[in-house]
Amino acid sequence: MEKIKIAFNLNDQDVSIETMPNKRLLDMLREDFNCTSVKEGCGEGECGACTVLRNGEPVTSCTMLAGQVQGERLLTLEGLSKNGELDILQKTFMEAGAVQCGFCTPGMILSAKALLMKNPHPSRDEIRRALSGNLCRCTGYTKIFKAVEMAIEE
Amino acid sequence: MKKRGKGVGSMWYGIGNTGLPNPAAAFIEVLSDTSVNLMVGCADIGQGSTTVMAQIAAEELGLSYENIHVISADTMVTPEGGASSASRQTFISGNATKLAARQAKATLTEVAAGFLNVPGEELIFRNGEIFSSNDNSKKMTYRELMAEMKKHGRLAVGAGAYNPKTTYLHPETMAGIPYEVYSYATTIAEVEVDTETGEIEVLKVVSAHDVGLSVNDTMVEGQIEGGVVMGEGFAVFEKIECSNGVIKNPIFSKYLIPTAMDVPDIYSVVVECEGECGPYGAKGVGEPALIPSIPAIAAAVEDAIGVRFCCLPITPTDVLRELGKLKTQ
Amino acid sequence: MSDRDFSVLGQSVIRKDALSKVLGEAKFAADYKFEGMLYGGVFRSTVPHALIKHFDASKALALPGVACVLTAKDIPGKNRTGIIIKDEPCLVDDKVRRVGDAIAIVAADTPEQVNEALDLMEVEYELLEPIFTVERALEEDSPKIHGATNVHAKKHLECGDVDAAFAKCDVIVEHTYNTSMLTHMFIEPDAGIARYEDKIMTVYCSTQNPHYDRADVAGVLGLPNNQVRIVQVTTGGGFGGKLDISVQCHIALLSHFTGKPVKMVRSRKESTNVSAKRHPMTMKAKTGATKDGKIQAVEVYMTGDTGAYASYGPAVITRAVVHCMGPYEVPNVRVDAVFTYTNNPMAGAFRGFGVPQVAYCHEGQMNAIAKELNMDPIELRLLNAHKIGTTIATGQVLEESVGFKETLIQAAAKAKEVM
């Protein structure tokens, strides 16, 4: 197999790389761009720990190939805070106690971010639905809902 | 038809290992600028023990939480902490932390008493200040105290170890003292059962937990909420399917754990209860958080449809079978 | 919540680890990288009970990038691990006891080479009769999984005169309760990375039990405990499933033999297949009360399947027996419990150590008694609840911090308000 060259925007920076076309997006982000906030929990697109935003939409990077992001905009948790200023969701996740082990946190925050970008005032049910692809085994989700609701109020 | 029901479940839980020694230790040092290094063996696996230890050390030393830096679970640096299991770390490593801080404080007290010219027993350490409980004009800041310590060549260090007071259990009757202290809890669950599909929806859960002292309400609630949802999984979702020793469902798409869609409204009630044995009375909540929701949800299903189940989890298929609605066996 | 005079306790301060976690900077074991590191993998049994007649790794060793393949005979120290009973081989030496037993380990330059090497390893088994039920395990003619008996642990607790007490009861309820084998499903699969640092074997890993890990890694390598350093890195949940040894001994061995850092990250499937499970249990309970609602006697017979290795089985059975009458004053108690080895997946610690199972049983019994007596279930519990001065079935007198009644009262009040 031959390497392919792809160019895309990662966390507001234009980047390009030569990579194997069958490399998973997850592996490319972690290994080639050191975006280790992107976690692998299952490798089958079920747990959501590897969620990144692709043109503002949450996708599981373990079920995508590197080549699929040619020319697109990707956001990982590394790119969420701007100039050292935390995103509102990062603040409310801390304040609400929505973080325990932290392994689901990057994907969870990004799914919540995608929701708020599309719908600035979601209901509890809309929050549940938006986060239903992100599994958490520690928190019982309740403080995560609260964190998202706190971010709405701000 | 959708039928609702309510159920109660309670539990008790002995803190620490059963009828066995299970000590933990801590080292502490207050530095000249009043920042603190606390070294505990206790592994924080997300439950928040590092934060709990910092709060206990801050309280005992009379410094702020921000002053405490915790180094945890590094066997070349930290003393033995035992396992993060048995809901034991707040109680056991917490007591060890308190004892370590107390030992450092004994030296601090001696030096402060000399400087302020009051008996050490009178001194209160609080919010970065040291003052006499009898005469609050006799006071100094922690920074002044650390300067005084330096002048006298004293170091504010401490080591603490704690082993819960238990006995080995008698091999034939199990008589003895299995645990030093117990946490208690009661959960009440409300469910709705769809008698056409067999689906069980857990609507609301109230869970009241006697934790002794709540070191951090948000974290205690976090344990309770996580436990309730894991208990929901235990009661109505989860089961490893094993055939000829092979696990058939080792992945999330086949072993279903609760998602954000499944979470009931959870009402945590934190109950405190005075006691001497835990650090400031604190016990444990990690496992108690899970336990009573399981029987409460099972009882609520029974209440809803009047059928008693003897196996967990109770799945939609089980509900339909008991209601005589399964078309094929 | 606390009305006592504290300055820091009772405050919902922000967790120490919150900032690094919301920034995505917290480093979990799989996020570590060391210069020149190799990747490790485990060749596992696909049968539940067998002798190994022949194992051949020659094709794997011939692959480019493969640094070494190790089997039991390479272990410099003791080939047994386990938190309470050291009955689990680090690498199978005598026989396979479950699907997923580790037979060989490999280190190679890339994860792809590791997988290729694992595919090329060959093993020939002599199959033994497997045991999958407690009943079969207890039969005299069943094959024995460890030593001379399949009984892993047996416990008996007794206080008072149970038979006489039942004779005086107005109501007696008898039910059998079953719970399933469950898995933790912590979201972070087990992972670790090991290397020598200044001649100290240093293992960075996801664990709930670093000091225990140290002893087992030292044991397997034949090193003194102070020549092994376990550093627990940010750990993605455990719930009891990261108390046993996972990758620690394997990566330490591979690093020891290759002289390079070795990293191992389990797939979800491998993690679930080989980490300990919750004990499936059967509990047959008999509870008797007088018509005033006082519980007079409880009798429980419970069995559990601890699978191929003991893990935390001894802790689970003991705790289950002590707790199985619930938080109630019961003057007459008799409990018998038997856990057996089988060739099923290993069962061990899982949040609650058997108490979730027995709580399903004792609370089912309490609700059944309440129904028989037409009593409110909260009232029945209040009437029998532990309090200061209660003597429990082991003879211990509860002297302080017994807040059970308050949980009943406050839960009932809150439920009245919101349900």
Image (cartoon, coloured by chain):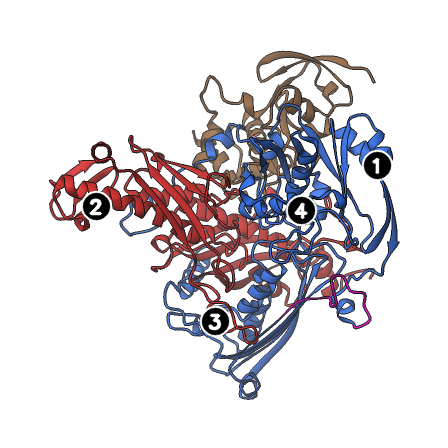
Residue type, mark 4 in image:
Gly
Identify the image quadrant of residue B166.
Answer: bottom left
Callout 1, which amino acid? Asp
**Dot 3 alpha-carbon crowd within 10 angstroms: few under 14, some 14 to 19, many 20 or more:** some
Image mark for residue C119? 1
Q: Nearer the viewer, mark 3 or mark 4?
A: 4
* Residues drawn in magenta: C140-154
Measured in 3D between alpha carbons, the distance from the residue under mark 1 to the one under mark 4, in whole angstroms, is 28 Å
The chain holding disc 3 is: B
Distance in Å between CA atoms under marks 4 and 2: 53 Å
Residue at 65 percent of width and 37 percent of height: A41
Q: Position of residue B321 (x, y in %)?
A: 75, 63
Residue B244 at x, y = what percent? 81, 56
**Disc 1 element:** helix
The alpha-carbon separation of the residues under discs 2 and 3 comes to: 39 Å
User: Does any portion of residue C357 appear in the rendered image?
Assistant: no
Residue in the foreground of this view, choosing between B126 and C21: B126
Colour of chain C as rendered: blue
Can you identify the residue that label 3 sits on?
B176
Residue for badge 2: B124
Q: Which chain is brown?
A: A
- Of helix, strand and loop, which mostly describes the magenta segment? loop
The residue sitting at 34% across, 38% down in the picture is B29
Three-letter amino acid code at the position of disc 2: Ile
Secondary element at image label 2: strand
Q: Is residue B33 above or below residue C289?
A: above
Q: Position of residue C96 (x, y in %)?
A: 79, 53
Residue under disc 1 on the same chain as residue under disc 4: yes
Q: Pointers 3 and 1 in contact (CB under 8 A)?
A: no
Label 4 element class: loop
